[in-house]
Structure formats: structure tokens, C-alpha cells
Image (spheres, grey):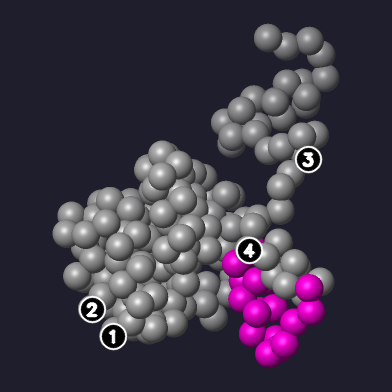
Amino acid sequence: MIRTLVVDDDFRVARIHAARVDRIEGYECVGEAHTAAAARAAIAELKPDLLLLDVYLPDEDGISLLRSLQARGENVDAIMITAARDLATVRAAMRGGAVYYLVKPFGFEQLQTQLESYRRWRREVGAGTVADQAAVDQLFNLRRAPSRAAGSRRLPPTMQKVLDAVVQAGEPTS
């Protein structure tokens, strides 16, 4: 079970993410934190494997929190979940050790796909102690969710229902 801590300043958003994490096989949301200080305390107490970490926190930005955790040797990974879209922030998150970056708003399916990729990556990383170049390449590729071919792109739920209704109508429909 991958123990996950949701860190977001908006308690409603944190609750939504926590509920979504609990729906994904192999994951357990062990808690929520709404500030960097609360996140540090929760990490010390709950020992999560993964943080879903917002950039915008009231007392410290999530990237500096992640860097300080890395500097202290905390054994926790982080997927950034944020509305921050500027490339400087994305790059800082990558340099700070984030394993992925999701831009809000995002749907359940996008979170689920990324968490499933993270689970596969984590399983492979823990499988051995030595890797050749092919294994290293595979590990880096597993960190990313598989990209979908243009023809298999999923529609938003409401649009999919409309399309299904039109297809099932059996006659011209407007």
C-alpha cells in the first residue's frame, strides 16, 4: 500500500484529492495538511511514501518544502498538484525532486493514470540494486503516465454522455 499525504492550503480541495487517492487500488490517504508546518509534522508522524503537494501554501511554497525534505534525507516522493503554470515553477519543481507535476484543475482519470504510473515505477525501483542503461531508461519512462494516441483521447464525462446518446439514437439527432 502506498501511503499518501495530501498537502493543499484549501481544505476542500485536499479532501477531494484524499477521497480520490482512496479510490485507487494500492493507495491509502493517510492524512491531509494545509500548511508546510503541518505537512512536516504529518510526515514525521505518518511516514508517507508520497506527497500530493501544492505549490501555494500559506507559510512556505511547496517547492521549498520539498527541497528541505530532500536535504534532510526524508524518504518521501512528491507529485506537485498546483495551479502554477509558469515554466519557471515547473522547472523548479523538477529540480527540487518532484516525480511529476499535475496542473489544476485535473480530473480523476488523470490523477489515477499518474498514480498508477508512479506505482509501477516504485515497484521497479525497489526490484533491484543495479541497473543497466535499458533498465534506467525504463525507470525514467515509467515515471510518466503513458501518452494516449490521438485517436484514443478520452472526452470529458459530459461530452462522452452526449456522444454516447447520439451514437445510440440510431437516427439523425441534434
Q: Position of residue 75 (x, y in %)?
A: 44, 82
Frontmost of labels 4 and 2 is: 4
Q: Residue at x 71, y 37 (%)?
A: 153
Q: Does the magenta run of residues contain 145?
A: no
Q: Is residue 18 visible?
A: no
Give SS at disc 2.
helix
**Residue 149 circle label:** 3
State the extent of the magenta-drawn residues as a range.
116-133
**Residue 45 circle label:** 1
Between disc 4 and disc 1, whose residue precedes? 1
Q: Position of residue 65 (x, y in %)?
A: 30, 66
Give SS at disc 1.
helix
- Label 3 is placed on what type of residue? Ala
State the residue in front, 83 or 74: 74
In this rendering, would 53 be left or right of 135?
A: left
CA gap, disc 1 and disc 2: 6 Å
- Label 1 is placed on what type of residue? Glu
Q: Which residue is mark 4?
A: 143
Q: Residue at x 41, y 54 (%)?
A: 92
Frontmost of labels 4 and 1 is: 4
Q: Are discs 1 and 2 less than 8 Å apart at CB?
A: yes
Q: Quadrant where the C terminus lies?
A: top right
Query: Dot 4, how many residues are within 10 Å of its Cα: few (below 14), some (14-19), or many (20+)?
Result: some
